[in-house]
Amino acid sequence: DVKVTQSSRYLVKRTGEKVFLECVQDMDHENMFWYRQDPGLGLRLIYFSYDVKMKEKGDIPEGYSVSREKKERFSLILESASTNQTSMYLCASSSQGEVRYEQYFGPGTRLTVT
Amino acid sequence: AQKVTQAQTEISVVEKEDVTLDCVYETRDTTYYLFWYKQPPSGELVFLIRRNSFDEQNEISGRYSWNFQKSTSSFNFTITASQVVDSAVYFCALDSGGGADGLTFGKGTHLIIQP
């Protein structure tokens, strides 16, 4: 079974803090993604990566950055957390190929910024 | 631009009823993939099905079935003889183009199955 793990289920941070959300997958997937989920808005793509050290902006990258130093690990960084970044953050991974493979999701990190 | 519309925000039915969740998509690509995911109260999204744009055959998996119609840009999901364990938020998603562009999700339909 594909396993995607996220470092924390719940996190509380203060405004202005630098926040790191970690994601690790164990299926040797090339692609990794970060989404945020908000009530009434569904899931929105923040950043994705299709290879080590490669990153691409998604639909809502402002206020975020990412790091992928190893194939299995994809980190989301909030440089200076703000209250409007309070949300559920979901990491996902998928295989790469000529077809689009399904994404496998982690359990999510519920981040509260106070 | 891609878009996925799930017009039903919330549906509530009594157990054993059949229920259909609607999904309408927009894309200019000729090759694309459609997905359905289930998010139970525990929060983790569970993959249910993937369908590519060249395969319009409907699919049945146990009590679940999917109806893909390119003519109406719809990919609807039906649960037959619903059960309380089917209660969850269901998301329809679209993926097209090359590379790893991520999924475009609908806003989800909250399905409540009452005993």
Image (tube, rainbow, N blue to C red):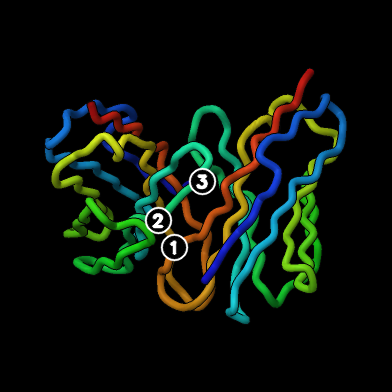
Instruction: Give a yes or no on whether discs 1 and 2 share a subunit.
Output: no
Q: Residue B35 falls in which quadrant of the image?
A: bottom right
The answer to whether marks 1 and 2 mark residues whose Cβ atoms lie closer than 8 Å is yes
The image position of residue A23, as x and y in percent, is 29, 46
Q: Nearer the viewer, residue A54 or A39?
A: A39
Q: Confirm whether residue B62 shows in the render.
A: no
Q: Chain of mark 3?
A: A
Residue A42 is tagged as: 3
Instruction: Give a yes or no on whether discs 2 and 3 share a subunit.
Output: yes
In this rendering, is residue A96 above or below B24? below
Distance Cα–Cα, label 2 vs label 3: 10 Å
Name the element at disc 2. strand
The image position of residue A50, as x and y in percent, is 33, 68
At 44% from the left edge and 40% from the top edge, which residue is drawn? A38
Q: Quadrant of the C terminus of chain B?
A: top right
Q: Nearer the viewer, residue B21 or B35?
A: B21
Q: Marks 1 and 3: which is nearer the front?
A: 3
Is B28 positioned to the left or the right of B77 in the image? left
In this rendering, is residue A35 above or below A89? below
Is A64 positioned to the left or the right of A104 in the image? left
Q: Chain of mark 1?
A: B
Bin the neighbour count of mark 1 within 10 Å (Cα to Cα): few under 14, some 14-19, many 20 and up. many
Amino acid carrying label 2: it is: Leu
Amino acid carrying label 1: it is: Gly
The answer to whether marks 1 and 3 mark residues whose Cβ atoms lie closer than 8 Å is no
Distance Cα–Cα, label 1 vs label 2: 7 Å
In this rendering, is residue B84 above or below A92? above
Q: Which residue is mark 1?
A: B102
Name the element at disc 1. loop
Q: Nearer the viewer, residue A46 or A54?
A: A46
Q: Which residue is mark 2?
A: A45
The image position of residue A57, as x and y in percent, is 30, 64
